[in-house]
Image (tube, rainbow, N blue to C red):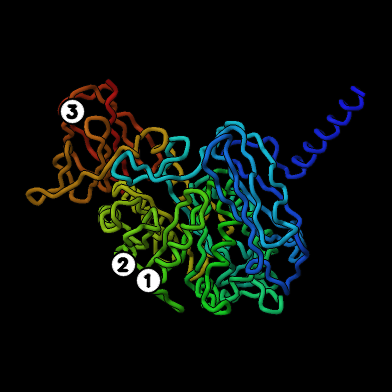
Amino acid sequence: MKNRTTTLSLLIFMMIITTLFSQNQLPIEQFDVFELNFNGPEYSEKDNPVTKVTFLTYWQYENSENFIKIAGFWDGDGQGGSKGNIFKVRFCPDRPGKWTLVQVVSNVPELNGQKAGLSIMCRKSTRKGFWLVDEENSGGRWYRRSDGSHQYILGNTMYSFLSECNWEGSNTGSIQKDVSENAKYFKKIRFSITGCRYPPPVDKPFLDDVGNPTDNGNFSHRPNPTWFYNRVDLAVQEAFKHDLIADIILNRPDTEDARSILKARENSGDFTPILNYIVARYGSYPNIWLCISNEWDIKKPRYAAAEINQIGHRLVSLLPYPTPVSVHGNQHDWDTELNTLVPWHDHIILQNKIKKLPAAADFIFRNYWIGLQKPVIDDELAYEGAGDGWSEADVIEAHLGAFLGGGYASTGHKFANKKGHYFVGNFSANEHLSADNLKWMREKIDSDISFWKLVPCFYTYSNQIQTSIFSNIQDTFRALEWPGKEYVLGTNQSQNGIIARLPAGSWRIKQFDLMKMEEKVLSDQGIGRFKFSSPDSRAVLFHFKRIE
């Protein structure tokens, strides 16, 4: 009897292990995404379980009283097919230890209670986790990760690359390659959930009332699982593998179809289904950011601030994790009508193409205050190429300016109007020439500078730009400081005889020429009144750090 019991126990154990391995999820690590399949009723393209089926799961950590509520979603046959009986739940364990699926609630009997009681063991990992506003440092200007680390963000733009089609109807690129190549240079990639201006001829993000694929965003309550499985999932999961932020834009600016996703006219204006779907499908990924709309206040159809606020509040109420959320407006300061009494956005998105260091810095700095002291990102700061008339040097100077203003920025490649990587992908650093400089800049900031401790410290006195320690500087220079600990000065032209009045202690002083990608140690033991010169370069960063 003992041998039979042992054998039976072993078989049960092997069945459990086989089931978990079939989910491709072992071992389960902290901040990984655990995907669990459920079997529900069979649905076809003509059906719409997105609006008919409610499906919620509740996950409990060990013996705590708190639960994480994760919505499930219909995924066709689970392998990219647009009909089938597969529902999925994606859960991210944010703490090591035992997690239990304590409750599964659905209005569909086949799903209700299915797999309740399942437990997973999560082990600590080296993943950095979610992006959180660092409220403890520098007035909440910067982000930190769940593990307490900080990475400086420079982004790239590829609005329609999910379509894998260009203006001629063909494209030799691939979603996976584009994401992996971007991850070598940038920390964030911006893209739309649809094909927008250059949609593919067959695959479409939505299904119409009779089940035909369509680009019409008014059918956003009927998302096509084939599109999301083969395209959006691929981009998000590849980005997750490289710890690259996937900044998903729900509403694109260029076509009425792509801009109508949140109008949802074929669903009586109810945008909730697409929000539910996006949150269920991607809201558990730590690398996900969500932008409600690009250029919400221009083009057709436009959105009123009240509409954006309504959408924003609804979106945030659905998110199970601290996912960064905001919206992208026209080329002006942040719209104060979006500063609601109960905030829904955790950062400020701007667009303003600014070639000069001081103007880029001042724009970021000003909007930090206009947006009620949140992280600021100029997501259309610099499109390199003939399309907007920007040189490689223009892009580099602009991005240094954004950093000196106490914020972040994104670039793009645009060789002609609506043409270039910024729409269709096919990213190449040989074409987007500033990519390697921006990578070098980002890596030097991460390795050398405690940027999350820094705040802008430039002001005008007697018609001269001054900072707390620098004097005799050009009015085009800008600076950041962590008083008594670290200082940064950014320059965009040559000047002799700059004075840094160093506080007590010994200071290591470095010069980073972002144009040449050259680093130079000016002093290992700088003290007192330190005199130095800026070279003839459009983007140089000087770093002063107290070492004793």
Mark 3, residue position = 503
Q: CA distance from mark 1 to mark 2?
A: 8 Å
Residue 423 x, y percent position in the rendering: 53, 65
As drawn, the label of residue 337 is 2
Image-based side of 365 in relation to 263, left or right? left
Tag 3 or tag 2, which sits nearer the N-term? 2
Callouts 1 and 2 close, C-beta under 8 Å: yes
Would you place residue 10 above or below residue 219 in this image?
Answer: above
Tag 2 or tag 1, which sits nearer the N-term? 1
Would you place residue 199 above or below residue 316 in this image?
Answer: below
Mark 1, residue position = 306
Q: Amino acid at mark 2?
A: Glu
- Occupied quadrant, residue 457: top left
Q: CA distance from mark 1 to mark 3?
A: 49 Å
Identify the residue shown where x is 61% and y is 62%: 162
The residue carrying pointer 3 sits among few (fewer than 14), some (14 to 19) or many (20 or more) residues within 10 Å by Cα, namely some
Identify the residue shown where x is 50% and y is 68%: 251
